[in-house]
Amino acid sequence: MKILHTADWHLGKKLWKFSRLEEQVTVLDEIVSIVERENIDIVLIAGDCFDQINPSTEAIQLFYATLFRLSRNGQTCIFVVSGNHDSPERIDAPSPLGGYNQIYFTGQFNKKIDYIDNDYFTFIKSEPGFVELVKKNEKGHLRLLLTPYVNELRLNQEIKQGEGRTHFTHIMTQYWKDQIAQHVDGDGTTLIVTHLLFSETDFAGESGEEKPIIYSGGTEPLKPECIPDLVDYVATGHLHRCHSVGDKIWYSGSPLAYSFSETDQVKGVIVLETEGNRTSTRRNVPLSSGYPLKKKTFSNIKEAVQWLQNNQECYVELHLVLDSFLSYADQQLLIGAHKRCLIVPEVIGQTKEERNQGPDLTLPIDELFKSYFQSIKNSDVNDDIMDMFNEVLATKGDS
Ligand SMILES: [Mn+2]
């Protein structure tokens, strides 16, 4: 069987105020093309399908439209597990419809899939958190342990713990061990599909990229030793860089660069091939959609505008090191020069202490305004703004 592993689509995610939906449409088109070109049998989506618990209608539509296209009328079987950004219930909601196209959702922990056999696949077994299937007229069995993101609190409600097994690592180790012991017999390929944080050392997490789950859900990273020997491959999500933890646990990474820590990463999906009872090959198929993310620093407005005009096909965080506050006119000039630009003005030579001094109330009102402006904007007021302030002050006197 040919299996495609992807994760962390984060549909509906924005960069600053800019929607990334158009790029998401394009990159999902790319994934659909790969599935068609490679004649993929199984697609695994390892969590964080959406960026938010309550995604936009556009994001939801894009998700279902893409799943439908990926399924190729039931020729490709799709398994989705939820990530920490997803609502487990929302992920499960379309389950009554999905089976007719071989689209199966595991939003909630230990969910049992209601499968529907078709011309391409025969299901052997479905148990809570576990499914086994074969491709018609082929021998190799595929077993999937479908383990969505779960935090320690939720896990404690789901599983009755044995004595002395209170840690997340211990619970998950035992859970997977039990799943294997209960359901796996005979030959076949066994995969875990999940959205959990794995680390070979005691603490992992890549700054800026994704908050480690340890902060967002109170759950510790899992060690590769948690994975039973019988498992051939772990398809996980959460970290946005394609990499492995140990030999078996793989992050496919996100299809687009979503933060500045991802700027140099090659984005893609992972394609696995199983021969009889083993995963025989694993390769990365790169994705090329989406704009790169850039950071630039200028101290001259003209040079900044020129650079922006010549570099349209990217997102840019534009740092401006200036000796006075950025004027409205210059700001408009910069905004007009680029569609995907965030302007970060910085003013030279100011210390925090200078900004934090309280106002001297004996000063005249224009001086107080200057100091107020400085405290709010972290920058000296310029003549344009001072003129405007005086104008407002004069108008007040008239009425
Ligand atoms: Mn995540």
Image (cartoon, rainbow, N blue to C red):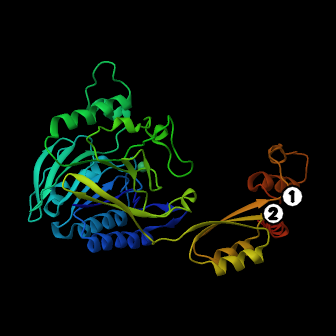
* Foreground residue among 387 and 22: 22
| Mark 1, secondary structure of its residue | helix
Residue 375 placed where, x, y %? 78, 51
Q: Which residue is mark 1?
A: 366
What amino acid type is highlighted by mark number 2?
Leu
**Mark 2 vs 1: CB contact within 8 A:** yes
Left or right: 237 with respect to 38?
A: right
- The answer to whether 284 is drawn above or below residue 223 in the figure is below
Residue 10 placed where, x, y %? 41, 58
| Mark 2, secondary structure of its residue | helix
What amino acid type is highlighted by mark number 1?
Asp
Which picture quadrant has residue 61?
Answer: bottom left
Dot 2 or dot 1: first in sequence order is 1
- The answer to whether 310 is drawn above or below residue 194 in the figure is below
Report, in whole angstroms, how far the alpha carbon at label 2 lies from the one at label 1: 9 Å
Which picture quadrant has residue 196?
Answer: top left
* Foreground residue among 82 and 251: 251
**Quadrant location of the C terminus in the rendered image:** bottom right
Q: Which residue is mark 2?
A: 393
Q: Residue at x 25, y 46 (%)?
A: 146
* Foreground residue among 21 and 58: 21
The image's mark for residue 166 is none
